Structure formats: C-alpha cells, structure tokens
Image (cartoon, rainbow, N blue to C red):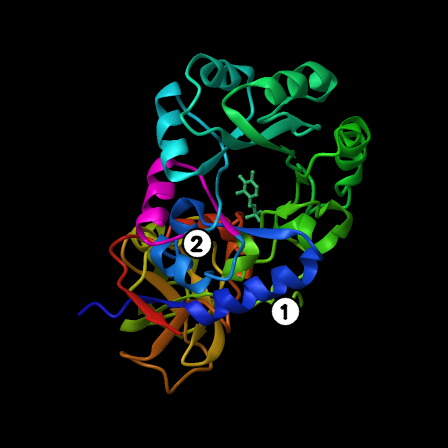
C-alpha cells in the first residue's frame, strides 16, 4: 500500500476547543466546521467538538448532516439562505440563517416559515464582503424585528484584519456604537479576534482555524497559542538518488546539487494536497529530524534533502506537517495559509483517526 496517511486527532480538537473557551469569557462558542471541518471530516469534528455550544456551517447539506448525526445544539448557516426554497428546511431543522442582504429578508417576508427563525443579521463594518450597510441599520433592524418569520435576532459582523496590527477596533467600535441602542446579542469574533481581541467576544464567538491547531497569526505559532495540531500528514521515502555536483532532481531540474548528495523521494505530491508551490527549503521532518524539500513538487512525489542523514533510506518515515512541522510553517513557505493546506487534503489520502 502507498505509505501516505493523514492522522486526525480528536483529542487535539477537543483541547483546542477548551483553549477557545478559555478566551471566550461568557460568550458561547460556535465551532466552525465548514469545508468538511477544514479537511478534518465533519463527523469527526462533531464528535471531537461535542462540547461546543453550537456549530457553524456553510450549506444546508452540512447542517442537515449534523442533525442526522444527532447534533442538538444551534447550527448557524454562515452565508444564510441561497434561495427562498431553503426557508422550510431551516424551520424544520431549527437552523439559524445569517441574513446578509435585503433579498433574504424579502424571501422570509413572502414565504414565512411555519416556525419563526432565530436569524443573525449581518452588517458590513468595513470588510466589504458580505453584510448590509451599517449606515442603514435603523431601517434594516426595524424591518427584521417585524418580520413574522423572525423570532430572535442576533447582530453580526466579520473582521478583515483581526490577524494584523490594524486589529478590529476600527470595525468593532462603529458596529457597537451604531447597534448598541438595540440591546441585542451580537457576534463578531473569528479565531484571530477571539485570541487577540477579547473585547470582540459578544454573545457568540466563531472560531474555526484554531480548533484544528492552526495559528491565524504570522508572528505567533500555534504552539505559542497553546494549540495542538489536529492533522498530521505522513509518508515514507520510496526512492533514494545520489546526485553529483551540478546534477538536478525533479521536473525542470529546478534543484541543482552543489556537491555530491543524497536525495530522498517521498510518496506525497500535490494530488495528495501538498502545495505545488512549496519551494526548495520548505520544512519537512525525515526520520524525526528536520530537513527540507528540494525542487518542484510532482503530482505523486516530492524530493527531500538527505544530507547529514546517512541512516535514512527507503521506508524511512517522513512528516510533511504535524507536531514536528507546523502546518503554518509549510503554508508560509509555500506562500499560502494553513487553512488552504488543511482544506486541500485529498480524498485519496487514507485517514487514521486517533483519540
Ligand atoms: C470561516 C468563518 C469563521 C471562522 O474563521 P477562522 O479564521 O477560521 O476562525 C468565522 N466567521 C465567519 C463568518 C466565517 O465565514
């Protein structure tokens, strides 16, 4: 059998949820499990994160699956309704949709559900992605409050720079100043805001990445944040080459040896979810020792430096990311974020679940 595998730790996710809770104060915690729980598997995440106060997903299918799995906590639909036809299911399954554009209020008005819904009214406080204009809050809140299909209202916004020095206050303060008059519960914090900006916690926080052991910050590692990696990607050396000075390895011979050296070929490539743009020098652990990738990542293989590792050979274990190799470090080397690497774990990689 091809030696690649991903190990998903339920215990790490449960631990990271406790870390999230320790930052949340009195706020309740939605565990964000969209995108197949950031690649970790919806069912696994549900079991590992059973202590969450609620779950947040993107689609009706994900929400319905969670209900089938026995989830009784509130379920938030982060982008709300994609059509009026989704209203009935929301009522049936007691899902909480986000309403981020006026058309969604129109749908509710025209076809009110049998059972009125708890809705999250989303305002744009400066990110300019989803959300209704903060300047129009009076008319919007008034309208939402009187819709027969609406039972409860929570106010919501999302931050553009919670992980950056600019922070959240330039968005949060106007949001609270404008909307504070209503005395309604509110929700704003993703992982970065929850970890670094406690004033943003409100009634509900919405951490995703941190639950899986990723750091949202460029300047702080997950370990420094007290988080444990939930996903480990491992494989083995399946070939060893000896290069002479000047010889290259991999497509384009992008890496060239400056002196005679041994190169290990690992059974892991971009079709497994390893980033193709990871350059020479991306960290990797070979037989428990730090090394680096060499040259271009292929579809099913990549090369690693065996210089100084004479005992390593075919069958030696390689950790692509996990406890010894932070997924954030691999992502940074490849010019992306750990979110993308976790979500991209390919279906062909066998998953081993551990406690
Ligand atoms: C995905 C998402 C989150 C979670 O963000 P993380 O950075 O992964 O913590 C929170 N809120 C909304 C609206 C989202 O779409």
**Quarter residue 313 falls in:** bottom left
**Residue bearing mark 1:** 226
In the rendered view, tell whether residue 77 sits above or below residue 327: above
Residue placed most toward the observer, 194 or 25? 25
**Residue bearing mark 2:** 342
- Mark 2 lies on a secondary structure that is helix
Left or right: 31 in relation to 202 = left
Mark 2 or 1: the one toward you: 1
Which residue reaches farthest bottom? Answer: 311
- The residue lying at 55 percent from left, 62 percent from top is 17
- The residue lying at 68 percent from left, 56 percent from top is 24
Q: Position of residue 211 (x, y in %)?
A: 53, 59
Left or right: 22 in relation to 295 = right
- The residue lying at 56 percent from left, 64 percent from top is 16
Q: Which residues are magenta?
A: 54-71
Q: Position of residue 123 (x, y in %)?
A: 65, 27
């Amino acid at each position: 059998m091809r030696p690649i595998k991903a190990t998903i730790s339920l215990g790490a996710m449960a631990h990271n949820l406790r870390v999230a809770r320790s930052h949340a104060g009195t706020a309740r915690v939605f565990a964000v499990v969209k995108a197949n729980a950031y690649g970790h598997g919806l069912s696994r995440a549900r079991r590992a994160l059973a202590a969450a106060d609620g779950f947040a997903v993107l689609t009706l299918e994900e929400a319905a699956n969670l209900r089938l799995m026995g989830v009784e906590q509130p379920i938030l639909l982060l982008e709300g309704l994609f059509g009026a036809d989704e209203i009935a299911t929301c009522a049936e399954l007691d899902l909480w949709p986000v309403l981020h554009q006026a058309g969604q209020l129109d749908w509710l008005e025209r076809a009110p559900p049998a059972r009125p819904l708890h809705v999250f009214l989303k305002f744009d406080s400066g990110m300019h992605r989803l959300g209704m204009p903060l300047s129009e809050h009076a008319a919007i809140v008034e309208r939402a409050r009187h819709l027969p299909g609406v039972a409860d209202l929570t106010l919501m916004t999302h931050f553009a720079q919670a992980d950056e020095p600019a922070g959240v206050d330039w968005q949060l303060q106007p949001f609270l100043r404008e909307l504070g008059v209503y005395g309604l519960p509110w929700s704003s914090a993703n992982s970065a805001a929850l970890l670094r900006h406690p004033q943003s916690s409100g009634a509900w926080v919405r951490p995703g990445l941190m639950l899986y052991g990723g750091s949202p910050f460029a300047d702080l590692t997950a370990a420094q944040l007290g988080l444990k990696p939930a996903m480990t990607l491992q494989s083995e050396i399946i070939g060893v080459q000896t290069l002479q000075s000047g010889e290259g390895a991999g497509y384009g011979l992008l890496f060239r040896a400056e002196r005679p050296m041994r190169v290990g070929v690992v059974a892991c490539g971009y079709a497994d979810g390893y980033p193709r743009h990871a350059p020479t020098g991306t960290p990797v652990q070979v037989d428990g020792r730090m090394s680096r990738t060499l040259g271009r990542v292929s579809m099913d293989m990549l090369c690693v430096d065996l210089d100084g590792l004479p005992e390593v050979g075919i069958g030696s274990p390689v950790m692509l990311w996990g406890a010894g190799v932070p997924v954030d470090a691999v992502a940074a080397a490849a010019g992306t974020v750990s979110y993308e690497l976790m979500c991209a774990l390919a279906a062909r990689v066998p998953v081993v679940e551990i406690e």
